[in-house]
Amino acid sequence: MEQIQRKLAEYTASLYNEQLQDESNPDFVVEVVSLFFEDSERLLNELAKALNQTNVDFKKLDANVHQLKGSSSSIGAQRVQRVCISFRNYCDDRNVEGCLKCLQQVKIEYTLVKNKLETLFKVIFIFQLYMIN
């Protein structure tokens, strides 16, 4: 148990103190990830709506996929980013069926990364409470 606690403390310190901390805003990481969740869910809804249209606006669709790709890249969600690259290729080809498949895959990958990040934040929160007491 001590070894797990030490590893978690080291990982948390590394995450917050060395890479992602903004000293003026200690909740920076949580805020960035929360914004990623909000933005991604909005974009996923926009993508679904666009693909349900009779005449798909591939230019708008591609712009939304590009935005999702960028935000995924900025937080390190590489699997989401990779699906977005394929998605953009199908947009270029004006391939609705390929786009629909990519939309389903990007939803799966997004859900996986969201669940993992939420679990990580819960573990960190519980660990911090444990360390205080």
Image: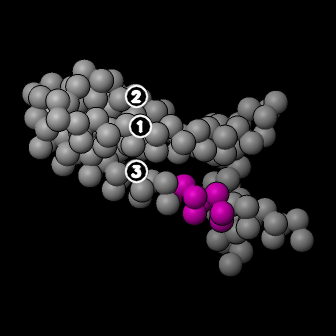
For numbered disc 1, what is the local secondary structure? helix
Give the camera-side residue of 20 and 60.
Answer: 60
User: Secondary structure of the magenta portion, mostly?
Assistant: helix
Marks 2/1 in contact by CB < 8 Å: the verdict is: yes
Q: Which amino acid is tagged 1?
A: Leu
Give the camera-side residue of 35 and 19.
Answer: 35
Report which residue position mark 1 lands on.
43
First along the sequence among labels 2 and 1 = 1
Report x, y in % for residue 33.
58, 43
Report x, y in % for residue 4.
64, 71
First along the sequence among labels 3 and 1 = 1
Closest to the camera, between mark 3 and mark 1, is 1
Task: Please check the rendered image and state whether residue 53 is part of the magenta-colored stretch, yes or no.
Answer: no
56 up-or-down from 80: above or below = above
For numbered disc 3, what is the local secondary structure? helix
11 up-or-down from 1: above or below = above
Report which residue position mark 3 lands on.
110
Residue stretch in magenta = 116-123
Q: Which amino acid is tagged 2?
A: Gln
Image disc number at residue 67: 2
Q: Is residue 50 left or right of residue 44?
A: left
Q: Is residue 21 left or right of residue 129?
A: left
| Residue at left offset 69%, top offset 60% | 124
The quarter of the picture where residue 111 lies is bottom left
**Cα distance, mark 3 to mark 1?**
11 Å
Residue 78 visible? The answer is no
Q: Is residue 80 left or right of residue 55?
A: right
